[in-house]
Every structure is written in C-alpha cells, then in structure tokens.
Image: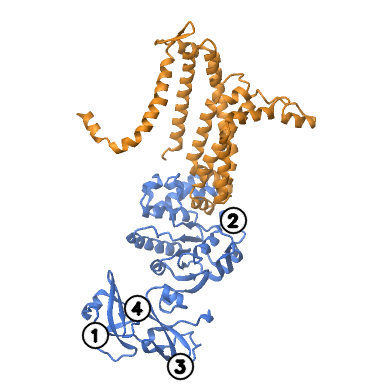
Amino acid sequence: MSEGQIVFENVTKQFGSAVAVQPINFEIKAGEFLAIMGSSGCGKTTTLRMLAGLETPSSGEIRLNGVRMNELKAHERETPLVWQTLALFPFLNVIENVEFGLKMRGVEKSECTKRSLKWLKRMEIEQFANRSIDQLSGGQRQRVALARALVTEPPVLLLDEPLSALDQNLVVRMQSVLTRLQKELGITFVYVTHSQSEAFAMADRVVIMSEGVIEQIGSPKEIYRNPASRFVAEFVGTNNIISGYIKELNEHSMICNTAFGVIESNLHDGNNSHVAGGAVELVISADMVELSQEKTSSKNEIQIQFIAEEFTGSVVTLYFEDDNKNELIVQKQQREIEPLELTYGCKIYAHWDPINVFCIPEVNAG
Amino acid sequence: MIFSNWIRSLDVYALTWRLPVIIWQVLFFLAPLIFMIAMSFFLVKNYRMVEAFELVNWMKIFSKGYFWNSYGLSLGLAALATFTASCIAFPASYCLAFKLSETARRWAIFFLIIPFFTSYLVRTFSWYVLMAESGVVNNIIGHLGIGPIKMLNTMFATNIGYLTLTLPLVIILQTLSMASIDKNLIEAAHNLGAGRVRAIVSVIIPAARIGLIIGALFCFILSFGDFVSPYYLGGSNPPTLPILIIDTTKSGQQWPRAAVIATVMMVTLMLVALSAIKIAYKKR
C-alpha cells in the first residue's frame, strides 16, 4: 500500500450563502494519523467529505500525493470513507459488502473473494462471512466497514465519527484496533470526531476547527498543554483560563496581576510579543495544580475553598473558589486526594509551577 | 379447555377496535367470495340459477380454447403494462426522489394524485378522442401527410389505458421507496468506486426493491382486473378475462360460468401477489 500525503490549499466551501469552511491550509503527512476535532457544524465533516469527493470545494485546491483532486469524481478517488452510520449495504451479506469496492474496480470474482476473505480474517470476522448485516453486533459491523474500506488497499482511509454509536468499553477496544491497523498498514488515517478522548488517544496530530476555521494544529500534548487560542483552551479538557495584565517582564518569565492575585509564568518558545502592561490570558491545566493542607510558600500559591467534586472513576474533578468567588478546577487521581481529607467548605492551599502556566496568543495574532 | 384458554387470552380492548374491520371484511369480502366460489358449482336451468354442486361449469370453461386464449392475453397484457409502467416510472421516480427538493417532491406527489380525482372512465374517453380513426392525433399527423394510423381497438390502446390507470400510482410508490433510501448508502457506493449507473444497479434498485416490486404488483393487479381499457380502447377483441366475464353473464345468464372465470382470476392474483411479496421481502 502506498502512503497518502494530502495538502489543503486555501480550500473553502460554501452552501448557498452559508460558509461551511473558510480558507483552510494544512498538510497531512504520509502515513500520519490525523484527527480533525471540533463541535458540530465546525466544518470538520465537510472538510473530510471534500477529500472524499462527496462535496466540491468552492475554491482552493486539494492534492493527494501531489495530484490535484478537485476535478476527480468521488468514484474515481481512492479515498474510502467509514461513515458514522457505517452505511453497510443491508441487502448484501458480510462478504458481499467487503467485495463491493473490488467488484466496482472490475476485479475478477475469485480474486474478489480471496482478497475479501483475507481482510475478514484480518479483522477477525471471517466466521460471519455469509451472515446478513443485521445479524451482527455493533463492533462486528465496525469491522466489516473497515474491511470494506481497506480491501482495495487505498493510500488513505477517512473516518467520520465511526465510534460514536458504540458502547464506551467497545470504543476503547476499537481505538486500539484502529491505531494498530494504522501502524501496520502505514497509510494515512484522517479521523473526524467531536470526542477529545478519541482524538487524543489515537492521533499523531490533531486539527481543531471552529466555525470553518482551523484554530490549531499540533500533537495532542501541544494542544492540551499549550492551546493556541481561548477557543482551544476552552474546548479541550479542563483548563483554568485566567485573564490579567503583565506587571513585570524579564527574559525568562513574567509576573501578571490577575483575579487570583499575582501569577508568575515562564515564557515559552514562540511567545515573544508580550509587553509590560499588556493584557494576557493564562492557561493552567486542571491536572497541573498541586494541593496541600498547609501553606508551602511556593510560587503561585493561593488559598481556596472546596465547593464540589465530580467523580469519574480513578480521576476526580474538584471545584474550588477563592474568597472572591473565582473558580479553580483541579483534576487529581482519587488516591492522591484521599490524604487531604476534603470536606465541603474546607480551606486548603493550591499552587502551580510557573513552567506549567501557558499564555494564549492574542486574538489578532491568528 | 384449550378453547376457553384462547377466549381468556383475547384482549377485549384490542378486539373492540378490530371488530369493525373484521365485520366489514367478512360481510363484504369473505362472504361474497365464498358465495362466488359456491356459485361456480351451481347450474342454470331455463335461464334461472339452481343451487347444486356440479363440476360441469369448471369443465366447460376449462375445455374452451377461447378461455385459455383470453387467460393468456390477460396475463400478457397485464405483464406488458407492468413492465412498461415500471420502466417509464423509474427515471421519473429517480428524478423525483433524488433531484428535487423535499418541497418540490411533495408537490409532485400531489400532482400525481390529481388524476385519481376524476373518473378513470372519463380519462379513458379522452384517449378515445385522441386515438380515434379521425381523432386528434390522426388529424395532426394527417396534415403532415402521415396516416391515418389505426390506434384504437389495438393492444397498444389497451396498454395506454392501463398506463393511464396505473402509472401515477407506480411513480408514487417508486418515489417514496427511493426517497427513503439512506443517502449514505448511495454515497458509500460512489465512495467505493461505483459511477452513477452502477450505483443505480447495485445499490438503488436493491435498496428500493420492496417499493419497486409493490408498485409493479399494483400495476399488474389493476391491469389484470381492468375492464374499461380493453373494452373501450382495445375494442374487446380478442377479449380479456374481465370482458369474458361480462360476455358470459350476458349470454344466457351464465353467472356460474362467470364465477368460474372470476375464481380463476382471484386465484391467479393471489398467487402473483404472494410470490411478489415473497420476493420483495426475501430475507437474504
């Protein structure tokens, strides 16, 4: 299988007067697992469908391995898509579904069967070859859809929220199936989702879209720790976003006045546009906040009051307030907070390292 | 014991609501049907029907060559109408289902219902005016130096009449079945390498199979039992089975023999309908 390198150059899409995708520019590297993430209506599915030829870009150019794709009809492209609904043909049985793409390419019948069986075996569903689709479970259907898309050995596989209809435990299983498959095949996967956990768990890089605009492209870690805009900071995970003014600025760090008092932040690469007195928005990931019962006299320490918690298994999300009712969110392992013996209304101390404070670039920078 | 259990298991509430339909069907469908079958064994003496149980009507009808000719003709004409109606309807339905907006489709279906507002007999007579020896069509092509073409009193005219009766219904049924196909399936076909024609053959037709077959079935049933078109447009020569029934009742009050023909038609349609539904809903 060849790898697929994809380039979007100034691609836009309008439906009538409604703009679905503003000019977007990005490259998907060959053999990369790329997730496009955003809430519904952000243009992520339209972007994927333009790649598959199911929508025509209003302007701009899409290239696959250097070849302009715009004029190619959907059925002339090698960009199989796995639908959210899977779109398996109910009037065909499992193996006939998988054979479909080969048959359309004029592959000989015995060869169709041979190659389809190979893929059914690979997806561990060969025993269902002659079953009808409605006799399969959700996870098995997922595997049929993947086999059907991959049987033609395409350079790229497109996935449109394929796991959103599955039970949570099955989602985790299919995630590992997908990542393993992608590593083994070495082809490009473009995965559209609204789920941060899916995107972060599988993707090499994540594209965050909002209202037809790309807000940020980066590795899951970059996006999580260093969001490029307030939108990203609010969209991904649990971040504390704190507005303030720069009080002092030196080579490596800055001191800001905020609602939580004075916060010291390290200056990270690429953020050199700050001036003393300028407005900033600081981002502190909820899991980067340390809690202690006694004052530790560390930098960035504040006293807070425990007001609520959300228990989600091993991780707990804790909500605190300072004396001025400013909210601070903290995420901790359940076993980490047990020694703190938190009770509602109790007062404890929170602090965070300046190295974990990030600064959202100013809006006009994007 | 079993009977009393059965009585107790009856849901009185549901039964109350079903009862009117059951009574209606028994009174106006099942009872006449049983009477018709019974009548096929009666005798006619001195132009009067006499209750009996004789096979003589059945043997008389089945031994007549003209009955089998009419039977074959009726089957053939109905099959032809079914085929032409399905073929003509398909592109129209495809267009209505996939090329029009939801609103336009709703209007189109409304317009397709309008023909049913007027009597089918009236619509047949308008064809009579058009297709007559000195009718509108022959008049027009006469000016061009062609014709006159004999259209009336041919099987062509009969088929036109059948299509007048059935085409709107077939289009409606086909359109509704195609419009309800999951659009993702069609996109998936394109995505997997099927061009427009192959998507129609390998996805749209199989996915709309039930509607296409039910549409064809309705066309067959209506055409097979229709008497107006073969009588007024086809000239009733050679006669189809419905015309044969009328002829039989007129000649010597042979109601029992007409009942034989009607029963044969009933059984034929039942077999056709059952096999059509079986094919339509075939589990794979």
* Residue at x-position 56% and y-position 49%: B98
User: Which chain corresponds to the colour orange?
Assistant: B
Between disc 4 and disc 1, whose residue precedes? Answer: 4
Which residue does the numbered mark 4 point to in the structure image? A286
Q: Is residue B195 at least partly visible in the picture? A: no
User: Which chain corresponds to the colour blue?
Assistant: A
- Is label 4 in a helix, a strand or a loop? helix
Which residue does the numbered mark 1 point to in the structure image? A293
Residue type at numbered disc 4? Ala
- 3 and 1 marks in contact (CB < 8 Å): no
State the separation of the CA atoms marked 1 and 2.
64 Å
The image shows residue B144, relative to residue A122, as above or below, that is above
State the separation of the CA atoms marked 3 and 1.
33 Å
Q: Are marks 4 and 1 on the same chain?
A: yes
- Is label 3 in a helix, a strand or a loop? loop
The quadrant where residue A13 appears: bottom right
Left or right: A169, with B35 as reference point:
left
Which residue does the numbered mark 2 point to in the structure image? A73
